[in-house]
Image (cartoon, rainbow, N blue to C red):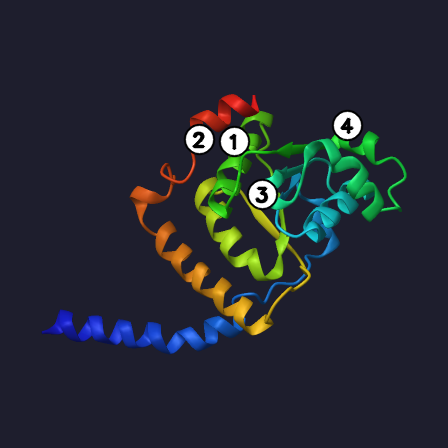
Amino acid sequence: MFVRIAGRVCLAAALLSLPYGFLAFDAFSAPPAQSIESAAAAVVFTGAHERIDAGLQLAASGAAPRLFISGANSRAGIFPGRFAPLFAERNPNIKDLPRLLACCVELGEMADNTAANALETRTWLQQRKIEGPVLLITSRLHMARALALLSATLGQQRIIPYPVEDALNGDPLRERAEEYAKYLATLVLVKLPLLVKLPWIFDAKRLASDSA
């Protein structure tokens, strides 16, 4: 009887928290300069090009010593062979983008969803032996889900959220509702110990060999 009552109380509490969670789940703001400068590397989870613009601007200013762009492939509207001309046009204040790309930016071309972004990022960090704080660049709306998956994948490594505003193409309320539903599903996923490594979503061994 006690277990049944406790279960109902927990369920009721969870249901009551949903409206507040919907209002607050994307309440991220830009980190202070000191936090940005403490990062050993910055990582972009692709989607809208504004996220990559933000990462390139940080790299160009020296605020991000190394930049990894995960999911840089045609599914995200990115073609590596056309990357430099496209983002040079979008970021005219960066005087020599090819030089910046050669010295400080790496593209990960395998990931095609957020869970895969997290695993691709972990592989890159391990290969480059980067153990310091990581600046995570993605949209404010996407940040909660990306942060949950990357935190589950990296363990204790510090992650600094750096939200940007994507251009909205549809109904803002509907987009928030859809992203919140995905975020709740992600929370369930990362709490299940057997699924934290997400082997059914992404082949980490193949990624490691392809990225070497």
Distance (Cα) linking label 3 and label 2:
19 Å
* Contact? badges 1 and 2 (CB < 8 Å): yes
* Contact? badges 1 and 3 (CB < 8 Å): no
Q: Tell me the quarter of the image containing the C terminus.
A: top right
Label 4: which secondary element: helix
> Mark 3, mark 4: which one is toward the viewer?
3
Dot placed on the residue nearer the N-terminal end, 3 or 2: 3
Distance (Cα) linking label 2 and label 4:
26 Å
CA neighbours of label 3 inside 10 A, class few (<14), some (14 to 19), many (20+): some
In this picture, residue 170 sits left or right of residue 182: right
Dot placed on the residue nearer the N-terminal end, 2 or 4: 4
Q: Amino acid at mark 2?
A: Ala
- Residue 102 is tagged as 4
Distance (Cα) linking label 3 and label 4:
23 Å
The x and y percentages for residue 32 are 71, 57
Which one is in front, 23 or 7? 23
Which residue has dot 1 on it? 123
Q: Amino acid at mark 1?
A: Thr
> Mark 1, mark 2: which one is toward the viewer?
2
Which residue has dot 2 on it? 204
Q: Amino acid at mark 3?
A: Arg
Label 3: which secondary element: helix
